[in-house]
Amino acid sequence: MQPISQSDRINFIRKHLITLPLRCAEPIMFGLHHEEVGEEHAWMRSATVTLLKVRDRRLVVLNEHVIRQIRRAVAKNTTKGTVRVQIGSTPVDIESLLLGTNAASDLAILDATNLTLERGERLDLVNTMTFGATCKPEGFVPLQYHQPSPWPAPDIAADDVVMLGGFPEMMRRRAGVDVTHGTWSMAGIAITGEGFDEFRIRFDRSGWENEFGPSNDPQLLSRELSGLSGSPVFVDRGAEGTLNSPLVGFVKAYQKDDDLLVITSATNIRSDGTLKARPDPIFLADDEGDG
């Protein structure tokens, strides 16, 4: 067997870093199905969840604000339909799975012990599902519960660069009853602000390259990133030609006007997978202000 060249090794690692967040991310959808309420009243919202395995316990991490949105939708629903919730192709009862929430860190934890979450292995970047019925997942890598190491999560540093990925709503397409969730991932992004339990990334898109298509793709410039909330964020700390990518956070919010991502730190989760009680975040630095 021929030894792998350094350039091939670096290219492999580059592709690995870009796809790493998508291995443990899935879309979460909630809304009213058109078969129950008709097209006029049907609607869907989506975000991203992260699958973790901590001390042999399977967990799903998402944003607390998504839990609030689901609860608000259920409370305000006056139709004959039911607000449905799915993670990928799996219908879920959020309240029965909920282990804890924290508004300050904007995190929630679900118990995934008895959840069956699967994905196919076609080499494309979509996860096709039928909302509220059967589905055909077509993810480009098998879905995995990420077992973070080191754990508890490490702190971030000012010179860190990160990679993240998830399922923004702009990539969602509907064809009949099928809903296709395209993925969106990025790597080599510098941190621009540090805080006590969160950090920030102000995008500089001038040097971005498209790994999977033309560099003039309009999606590289799009600020329609709603739905990335809950996406896993990893830091790249490997020397050239090596892999060292700890989980460090989850997308908390995207500020469209400032092209700014707010990341809640993975240190908000204890070593046993439970959430820490946090006060309101204390922000310490941002090289361009709070935005």
Image (spheres, rainbow, N blue to C red):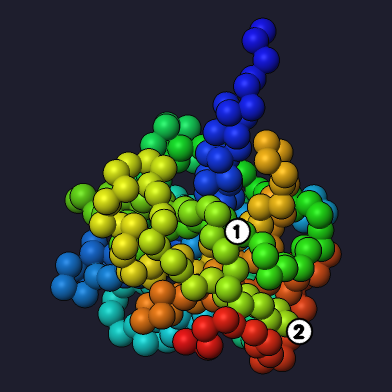
Q: Work out how far the residue at label 1 is from the one at label 2, CA to CA, in angstroms.
A: 26 Å
Q: Where is the N terminus found, in terms of image quarters?
A: top right
x 27%, y 51%: residue: 217
> Would you place residue 105 above or below residue 129 in this image?
below
Q: 232 or 160: which is nearer to us?
A: 160
Residue farthest toward the left in the current orientation of the protein: 40
Left/right of residue 48 with respect to residue 107 in the rendered view: left
Q: 122 or 289: which is nearer to us?
A: 289
Instruction: Name the element at disc 1.
Output: strand
> Would you place residue 60 above or below residue 141 in this image?
below
> Would you place residue 251 above or below residue 149 in this image?
below
Left/right of residue 197 with respect to residue 66 in the rendered view: right
Q: Which residue is mark 2?
A: 277
* Disc nearer the start of the sequence (1/2): 1
Locate residue 229, reporting x and y percent.
49, 69
Dot 2 alpha-carbon crowd within 10 angstroms: few under 14, some 14 to 19, many 20 or more: few
- Which numbered dot is residue 91? none
Residue type, mark 1 in image: Val
Q: Quadrant of residue 206?
A: bottom left
Q: 30 or 51: which is nearer to us?
A: 51
Q: Quadrant of residue 131?
A: bottom left
Dot 1 alpha-carbon crowd within 10 angstroms: few under 14, some 14 to 19, many 20 or more: many
Q: Which residue is mark 1?
A: 162
x 36%, y 52%: residue: 181
